[in-house]
Image: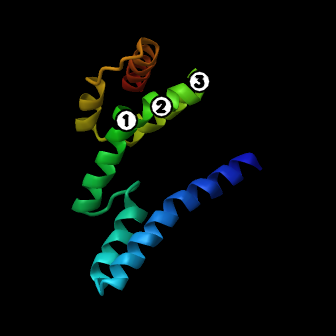
């Protein structure tokens, strides 16, 4: 039940800014822009077009560069490890090399990420 509530909450967090952006675009009589915003947000995890693929890859990189250090502070090592492996599965080969070169100020996190990279590359 808690996971369902968390998913609902996170969905609302994503959808509220999306709705605001779409409404602003529509108020400006920019229907194509509203459609583009809606499309990009809804497909940023999966890709599918050149533009959305770029957004998907940027989002995937930001997981490691921006979000993972904060995720590590709020969650257990095991949860962070799961998130790290989940993120690596999403990366294309060319971006795995980019992410593998990130340095983290927290050495425990850096060791965890290096362990995940090693584990991921063995499979």
Residue at the extreme bottom of the image, as rendered: 29
Q: Which mark is residue 70?
A: 2
Q: Secondary structure at mark 1?
A: helix
Name which residue lies at 57% across and 54% down. Answer: 10
Q: Position of residue 35 (x, y in %)?
A: 34, 77
Residue 36 visible somewhere in the drawing: yes
Q: Say which quarter of the image contains residue 103.
A: top left
Quickly name the residue at label 1.
66
Name which residue lies at 36% across and 83% down. Answer: 26
Residue 81 visible somewhere in the drawing: no
Q: What distance separates the C-alpha of mark 3 from that of mark 2?
A: 15 Å
Q: Contact (CB < 8 A) between labels 3 and 2?
A: no
Q: Position of residue 41 (x, y in %)?
A: 39, 63
Q: Residues within 10 Å of mark 3 (few under 14, many from 20)?
A: few
- The C terminus, quarter of image: top left
How many numbered marks, from 0 up? Answer: 3
Quickly name the residue at label 3.
78
Q: Contact (CB < 8 A) between labels 2 and 1?
A: yes
Q: What distance separates the C-alpha of mark 3 from that of mark 1?
A: 19 Å
Establish if 44 lies above or below 86.
Answer: below
Residue at the extreme right of the image, as rendered: 1
Q: What distance separates the C-alpha of mark 2 from that of mark 1?
A: 8 Å
């Amino acid at each position: 039940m808690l996971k369902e509530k968390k998913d609902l909450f996170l969905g609302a967090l994503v959808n509220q800014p999306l709705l605001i952006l779409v409404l602003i675009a529509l108020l400006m009589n920019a229907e194509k822009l509203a459609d583009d915003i809606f499309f990009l947000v809804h497909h940023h995890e999966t890709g599918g077009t050149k533009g959305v693929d770029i957004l998907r890859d940027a989002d995937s990189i930001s997981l490691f560069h921006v979000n993972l250090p904060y995720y590590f502070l709020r969650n257990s090592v095991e949860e962070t490890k799961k998130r790290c492996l989940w993120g690596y599965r999403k990366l294309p080969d060319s971006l795995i090399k980019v992410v593998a070169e990130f340095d983290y100020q927290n050495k425990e996190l850096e060791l965890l990420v290096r362990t995940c990279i090693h584990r991921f590359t063995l499979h």
